[in-house]
Image (spheres, rainbow, N blue to C red):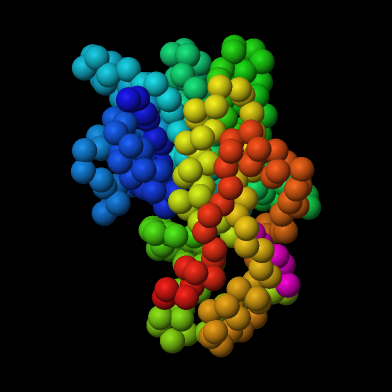
Amino acid sequence: MSKILVTGGCGFIGYNLVKRLSKDGHEIIVIDKKLNDNNINGVYYITASTVDIDFWMRRLEKQNIKIDAVFHLGEYSKVTPSFKDSDKLLESNYIGTYKVLEYCRKNNIKIIYSASSTKHSEDSGNESPYAFSKKKNVELIKNYSKWYGLKYAITYFYNNYGPKHDTCNDGWETVVSIFEKQKKSGKKLTIVSPGTQKRIFTHVDDTVDGLIKAWKRDENDEYQLVGNDEYSIIDLAKLFNHEYELVSERKGESSRIIKKNLVNYTKKVLNWKPEHKLKDWVNKL
């Protein structure tokens, strides 16, 4: 079994990934700035920024703990707030990720990076500071491979939902989580105008399965972890069978361009396909 570092392991996708890896028998170390009730027994948690990864990894090395793989999910991940959160974005998505890459480079460790589907938007990932940072980190990882022989897997996520998707609980979590909360509290579902924008939704268990398969595949590559369910936001609201209202457009939001050839490529080389349906999740509410 492997010793695996997961940055951002207390977040929504991070929690589900850590849970699966731990269940599979791997030894897991998590670095996350904010610990919460998503802790899992048997996992070693470090409350820290990825900026300080070298300090904490040196301490582990003194205990003869050598990392075999790094799943890097610990970045700032909000689109609209990124226009204001310049300091948080700089620390996490630029300095923090650089430090993680350097750690992987120096120790010959494969990095599995959680990229963003915003790169495949109408404006090619330039519509927000967040999207731009994620796009540039993909370029940096590829260049580290070219310059230094870094081993990598780059994975793209698409509107995940599932257990713990309300982890951040600050109004910027997944749209499925927001709609769930609004319906349970008897409020109207708030749809960002125009409401006709389409999204593809992916259950987090399918994403985790894809992440692990990307880690285990030897080749350096990019993978589109895209679910089966495509809905406009209005159609998603109708799926919840609840009253809704339109609200003003949000800065930095845009539709994603799904390239089916890349999706089919991912399914083929990883032997991966999404198993879950969004309708089943909503019907359980």
When asked about the image quadrant of residue 5, the answer is top left
Q: Position of residue 63 (x, y in %)?
A: 21, 17
Foreground residue among 118 and 156: 156
Q: Is residue 175 above or below residue 126?
A: below
Residue 207 lies within the magenta run = no
**Stretch in magenta:** 196-200
Q: Dividing the image into 4 quarters, which one contains the C terminus?
A: bottom left
Predominant SS along the magenta part: strand
Q: Position of residue 110 (x, y in %)?
A: 49, 22
- Residue at screen point 56% across, 22% down: 218
Is 197 included in the stretch rendered in magenta? Answer: yes
Where in the figure is residue 42, as x and y percent of width and height?
A: 21, 38
Seen in the picture, residue 198 relative to 3 is either above or below; the reply is below
Which residue appears at 51% of the width and 35% of the height?
A: 213
Residue 221 lies, in percent from the top left, at 64, 28
For the point 41% across and 36% down, the residue is 7
